[in-house]
Image: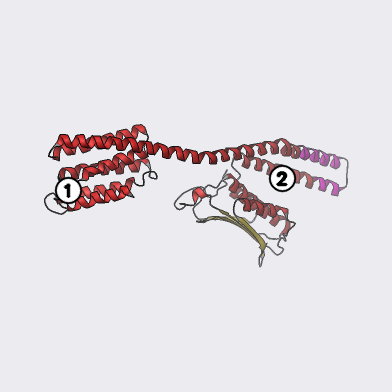
Amino acid sequence: MFGLTAMTILFVVAVVTDPEPGLHGDGPWVVLGLVLYIAGIWMSVPARDVPARRRFVGLVLVTAAAVLLTIVQPKGAMVGAVYYVVIIAAIAFNGRQALAVSAAAVAAGCVALAISAENPGDAIVATLLSVIPWFLVMRLVGELHDERDQLRASPAAHAESVALAERGRVARDMHDVLAHSLSALALQLEGARLLARDRGADPEVVEGLERAHHLAVSGLTEARQAISALRGDDLPALEDLAGTFPGTTLTVTGTPREPSSEARLALYRTAQEALTNVRRHSASDRVELKLAYEDDGTTLTVQDHGAAAPVIGGRGYGLTGMRERAELLGGRLNAGPTDDGFRVELWLPLPRADRRATSGRGGPSSPLRS
């Protein structure tokens, strides 16, 4: 607040000092200096939340304005803008960059004083003696800010590291126990099916073994996909999933964005579970799969249009698990019958880091592209 007040005072002094802004004499030069001054401040504040390149350009503009107005208005105070450049550079840049930018600004200001001041030597010495302490103090402030930010980031980084380690452990356990067991089960069932067929077993027995083998293979595939998701690997695209269910169309609206691995898994699993339920329980030959990227989150909708809609209540552990997964991510899952079928809708909120600005970002047509 104090800094902006000081910069405002410098602007007002430049406006009322002779020569004043205008269209005659040195007036246009004053106007140009004030425009550079305002543009430079706008591009360089706040001190710690501006891209480095933009801030650098802003400080260059402020320095140019200080030099121009100091020469044009010898009785003005615009040389004080050099202090602003030094302070912002000391806080925002690292040591060498801060020193280089500050030294260049001070040197330019001293040249302007040498041209315009009545006693150039005294003015230059006074500027140097006063600006150096400011630089050193603000460098210390900048380092304290950096240390504070690092301390704040440490717990979050540690928590993320712990979570990644735990996910890796779970993935290894699933691979070593569940995936191996399902693989062995699939092999045993296939062997039993072939043996039963070769020995002329009842056709119903053979058919039952085939179904059991298919379920074991499907479970193994899903277990491997879950392991890949825990490890951060890509899941198959929703387009590919829709292609495995005849009559399913996928529509994507909004600006696509890349979700977290947990969100990708929730979206994929919900679509997979809903489409599987349609295949098992519905006579529908048309299913609409919609993925909508909205300002506050992502919505996945699976709607079938069949005469016999699935009835999923409290005992439906598939969608119950998806609902629990959605709630863990701060989202919600709704499922229920419609006039001509069944509808499943999953909504997941944006991560905190993505809630500020989501418009204008490009991406793939689906967040689950392989």
In-front residue for pair 323/208: 323
Residue 27 is at least partly visible in this image: yes
Element assignment for label 1? helix
Q: Residue 305 in the image: x percent, y percent?
A: 65, 63
Q: Which of the marked residues, 1 or 2, is nearer the chain's N terminus?
A: 1
The residue that disc 1 covers is 29
For the point 57% across and 37% down, the residue is 161
Q: Main secondary structure of the magenta part?
A: helix
Which circle, 1 or 2, is nearer the viewer?
1
Are there few (<14), some (14-19), or many (20+) residues within 10 Å of tag 2? some
For the point 75% across and 46% down, the residue is 215
- Residue 147 falls inside the magenta stretch: no
In-front residue for pair 240/68: 68
The residue that disc 2 covers is 218
C-alpha span from label 1 to label 2: 77 Å
143 relative position to 209: left or right: left
Q: Which residues are magenta?
A: 184-209
Q: Residue 169 in the image: x percent, y percent?
A: 66, 36
Quadrant (top left/top right/bottom left/bottom right) for the C terminus: top right
Q: Residue 123 in the image: x percent, y percent?
A: 18, 37
In-front residue for pair 230/307: 230
- Residue 185 falls inside the magenta stretch: yes
Q: Residue 309 in the image: x percent, y percent?
A: 70, 62
Q: Is residue 53 above or below residue 365?
A: above
Are there few (<14), some (14-19), or many (20+) residues within 10 Å of tag 1? many
The amino acid on which the numbered mark 1 sits, given as a three-letter code, is Trp
For the point 67% across and 36% down, the residue is 172
